[in-house]
Amino acid sequence: MKPDAGEREAHDRYGRVSFVSRPADRGGDRGGDRGPCTSRADLHARARGIIGLGFLLRLADDSFGILSEDGAYAFDVLAELGIVALLFRVGLESDLAGLRRQIGSASIVWIGNIVLSGVPGYFVMSWLLGFDQIPSLIAAVTLTATSIGVSVGMWRQHDALDTSKGQLLTDVAEMDDLSGLALMVLLFAVVPILRDTEGGSGESGGIWTQLLSTGGWLFAKFVLFAMLCAAFARYVEEPMTHLFEQHATRQETTVFVAGIGITIAGVAAWLGFSAAVGALFAGLAFSRDPESVKLDTGFTGFYHLFTPFFFIGIGLSLDTGAFTSALGVGAALAALAVVGKLLGAGLPALFATGATGAALIGVSMVPRAEITMIIMERGQQLGDWAVPAQLYAAFVLVSAITCLFAPVTLEFMFRRWPDQAGREPQSR
């Protein structure tokens, strides 16, 4: 059974793939609607167990040395492919055209969200918890991120995702994804210079010159890369996709699209942005053409095959001796993560959605998962001077706590205020 025009429009946002991949369309009659963010929510629900599996593997390796150097390298490669698959899907699910139509109200919420999450995070890290400047900056950037897939399932379950409040939530979350990765790229470009400053080398004037020149060069490369991706999306992607659909099987086309995504991610890494940024831009390039989204049914296998290795890699990276000392830091950062999003996203949303909508949006922005751990993982690769083992373990706890807090609280709120949640569909 094919959807009518109204259903197709209602699912054009974070559930737009569902009319292609729903079970009924594949010959079954089970019903249901499992859009891409539902798949991400399912993955987040399993992520704690997958991280636990990786940690058990780390414990076994520490005790018995079961992982050879080649085996550890293989897990690193698979984890990197997992990041590419994960961020490609984040980009694929984005709706930049819809975001542009609501950019005003979304920007206000986004600014409050970033400022009230990141700035207090830096001062709590440096003043209260006693971390150095660079770990404090990385933690502050990490706290600005949001994992919308954890909350979207609850909004869809209560028929609220396609309301004005749900649209504002997804717009702000998309801006969070983009800004979190942009801040990560900028921060990791300048932290080597900041490390030299902490070491006492270099004069203050010279340091500022290095920071400005590094930031300027990075910005120029970023603009060039974004323009190339935009040109690909506008002039190349659609005719190329149609060509392959006409002359190749669906499986061959999916492999080709995945290959393009990996290639773009590799170019981004070569330019110094990290593969995660390239994968996001690759997904954005293919999200422009609605026809290309149909390829997502084939991409799902690639996504589910490789993405768990990212979370296994998190478990493998955990220091077995760091958890005890990380409990206090993790509890403090988890409290800050909750309060920062409740105030940062909730207060600005109060003027656009009212008290109930602001509370729902604030709670929905609390979860930290993939973007958070990508930033932490990139920082850990630099060394303990950037992300100590204690801080890395603390953010694993933050991710677990926030991803449990949000769905439980949202379920209570939707049941407590069903009418105020607002279920009237709003066309974009």
Image (cartoon, grey):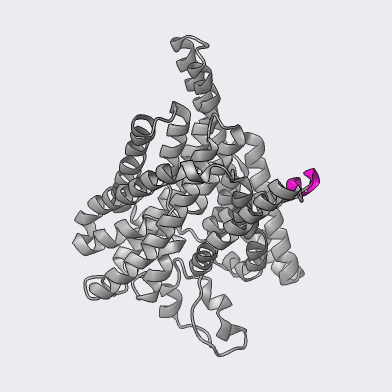
Membership of 182 in magenta stretch: no
Count every numbered label the image shows and give the total: 0
> Which residue occupies the foreground of this view, 143 or 99?
143
Q: Is residue 144 above or below residue 131?
A: below
Q: Is residue 57 above or below residue 205?
A: below
The residues colored magenta run 68-73
212 displayed left or right of 269: left
**Magenta stretch: dominant SS?**
helix
In the rendered image, residue 383, in percent from the top left (x then y), is placed at 59, 32
In the rendered image, residue 343, in percent from the top left (x then y), is placed at 26, 49
In the rendered image, residue 428, in percent from the top left (x then y), is placed at 36, 65
Q: Determine the residue positioned at 30% across, 49% down.
A: 339
74 displayed left or right of 156: right
> Which residue occupies the foreground of this view, 304 or 425?
304
Q: Determine the residue positioned at 49% across, 32% down.
A: 187
309 displayed left or right of 165: right
**Residue closest to the far bottom:** 29
Q: Is residue 194 above or below residue 19?
A: above
Q: Determine the residue positioned at 60% across, 70% down.
A: 294
Membership of 71 in magenta stretch: yes
Q: Determine the residue positioned at 49% across, 17% down.
A: 197
Q: Is residue 232 visible?
A: no
> Which residue occupies the foreground of this view, 75 or 365?
75
Q: Is residue 41 visible?
A: yes
Q: Is residue 288 above or below residue 422?
A: above
In the rendered image, residue 333, in percent from the top left (x then y), is placed at 38, 44
